[in-house]
Image (spheres, rainbow, N blue to C red):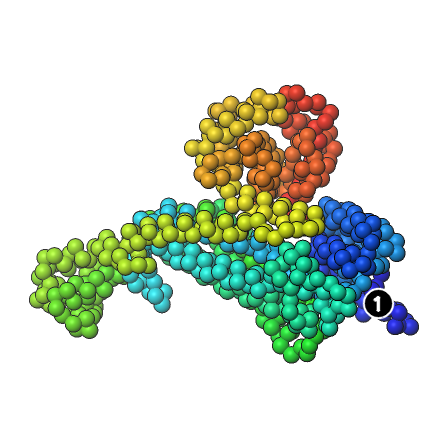
Amino acid sequence: MALWGGRFKEAASAQFKKFNDSLPVDYRMAVQDIVGSMAWAEALSQVGVLSQQELQDLHKALNELKDSVEQDPKQILTSDAEDIHSWVEGKLIEATGDLGKKLHTGRSRNDQVATDLKLWCKETGGELLLALVNLQQAMTELAEREKDTVLPGYTHLQRAQPVTFGHWCLAYVEMFNRDIGRLKDALYRADTSPLGSGALAGTAYPIDRENLAQNLGFRCATLNSLDAVSDRDHVIELLSTASISMMHMSRFAEDLIFYNSGEAGFVEMSDLVSSGSSLMPQKKNPDACELIRGKAGRVVGSLSGMLVTMKALPLAYNKDMQEDKEGLFDALDTWLEVMQMAVLVADGLKVNRSRTLAAAQQGYSNATELADYLVGKDIPFREAHHIVGEAVLAAIDAGHALEDFTLAQLQEFSDKIENDVYQYLSIESCLDKREALGGTSRVQVQKALENVQGENGTLSANVIGAPGKQQIQTALKQVKQRLNAQRAAALSVRRARMSDVDRIFTLVNFWADKGEILHRSRDNIIHDIQNFVVAEVDGQVVGSASLYIYQTGLAEIRSIVVDQDFHNKGQGRAMVQYLLEFAHSIELQKVIVLTYEPDYFTKLGFAKIDKDSLAENIIEDSEQSPGKDPEDEIAMEYNVGS
């Protein structure tokens, strides 16, 4: 159903309709459109357009529609509606009759779509912030692991001075920290509500727009209706932030591609993020990093496209703005996927410490130390620089390092050189002298790690903090609470370690004693520890789950348990999502569960299947839980590819 048409004598051509319709893209804003409609219904009731009974009927229908959309968002794509706004309105009219036609009173699609998109950006921004924090944490953990590993530093891709691998990691932590700042700034400016601005001149009804903004979770309402409906700065700022961050990701990927090369041999990528050659069996290619590097251009392209689209548009709304979503959705999806892949790369990276040390010892990276040594002997730096240049040239001709010269040979370049020179030429000296703030000395790297870990705690709190405003609409509360729970939980999920065995054993058998799941022996958990993930809060393991792989392409999620003090906080959901993402990364095709709580897994994307369709070995492995009726156990399946 079109939201316009009375002015027209003929229907639009099929060709124009396909060209004009935006539903295949903007269907992703269905929940936001429904939530915005609920808030608008509340505002209309406050000015007497809707009665309390009409408001209740609309809220009931909109809540039911929201639940249906959350269960199956792709159902929208079967419609021939023009856009998500007409689809929602059509469904509302189906459910409530003429009452559904009253909801658009005083509202335009112009302020409606602007509001929907800002709500979508706010929610997606929270997920992106979380992904950035997770990536920072992964790089911090890698820095901690390799804080003492010597690495040659480069300028112009020539070996320059030695650094530590931890120092290299922390350089990217700094970049990602700036990305976090930019994203938070962009989301702050996007946090204004356009709803009530009408088509361009404002609404004719005495709507309290500040109250309406607060009901939707915005910090305030926009101040100019012309600007409100035509503003897409938030889209451009998010694309700009994504582009800068993707540039950082591309540099990160390029460094690792070089470090991974046969010529350098500094690192080895995990099998989980590498591929082989169809012709050359010896090859192990860093495809994940190459794709990260390649996808940066895609995101930057979306930014360029949006800037060109907006550069000459007159006030106020123009149909050109319909092009704002496809590039934005794709860019932010790509950014999120790249950050998640970068975490997987960092987690599985193996550093060849002997190769990095040997490379740092070559290339005369201690030449600057020799120059500084001569400065300490009262030789002006420019003269010292020249002396050392001559020494390096002689060392190259001789085919050995500076420290391999005898004292007498070094004294041929300067009589100020004495026996103490050799302690200045060691790698340890090169590193330890860099003790100024931000330097590569081990002391400074450790301080930087402590500072970053402290900042991550602050950032995590900012990401997962609850909204500070009272929400009127129950639906909006549910959306925000669910997202917050997911963020909080996802921050704490990680692969299990041997040190977690006892805690996993305790958790599993606590619930086994209550008849909820099967008992597992400590030896069994030790044997399967590589299949487990744990949820951690403040350093304490509060939940665990495992992914048991039956065969190529098929696995089962088992033993999902959460400490009873942490129930209903999203920990179980986060562990399942983590395992599903892992299943995707290792190219599994399907993941199954056998459960007594099908509704829980339906919300996570699982669908019921015939239990009898499962192979006999799966049924045999999955013995019935004590105290449960076997007839109540439901088989469910998740299609990883989708």
Count numbered badges in the picture: 1
Residue 8 appears in the figure = yes
Position of 528 relative to 575 (above/below): above
Q: Residue at x 71, y 68 (%)?
A: 197
Assess disc 1: are there few (<14), some (14-19) or many (≥20) residues with their C-alpha within 10 Å of its C-alpha: few
- The N terminus lies in quadrant: bottom right
Q: Residue at x 87, y 68 (%)?
A: 5
User: Is 433 left, or right, of 114 in this rendering?
Assistant: left
Q: Amino acid at mark 1?
A: Trp
Q: Nearer the viewer, residue 446 or 635?
A: 446
Q: Residue at x 18, y 57 (%)?
A: 424
User: Is 259 left, or right, of 476 in this rendering?
Assistant: left
User: Is 94 left, or right, of 286 in this rendering?
Assistant: right
Position of 490 relative to 9 (above/below): above
Secondary structure found at label 1: loop
Q: Residue at x 75, y 55 (%)?
A: 42
Most extreme residue toward the right is 9
Quadrant of the rendered image containing residue 110: bottom right
Residue picked out by circle 1: 4
Q: Position of residue 298 (x, y in %)?
A: 58, 64
Q: Position of residue 215 (x, y in %)?
A: 67, 55
Residue 637 appears in the figure = no
Q: Position of residue 604 (x, y in %)?
A: 66, 42
Quadrant of the rendered image containing residue 82: bottom right
Q: Position of residue 573 (x, y in %)?
A: 60, 40
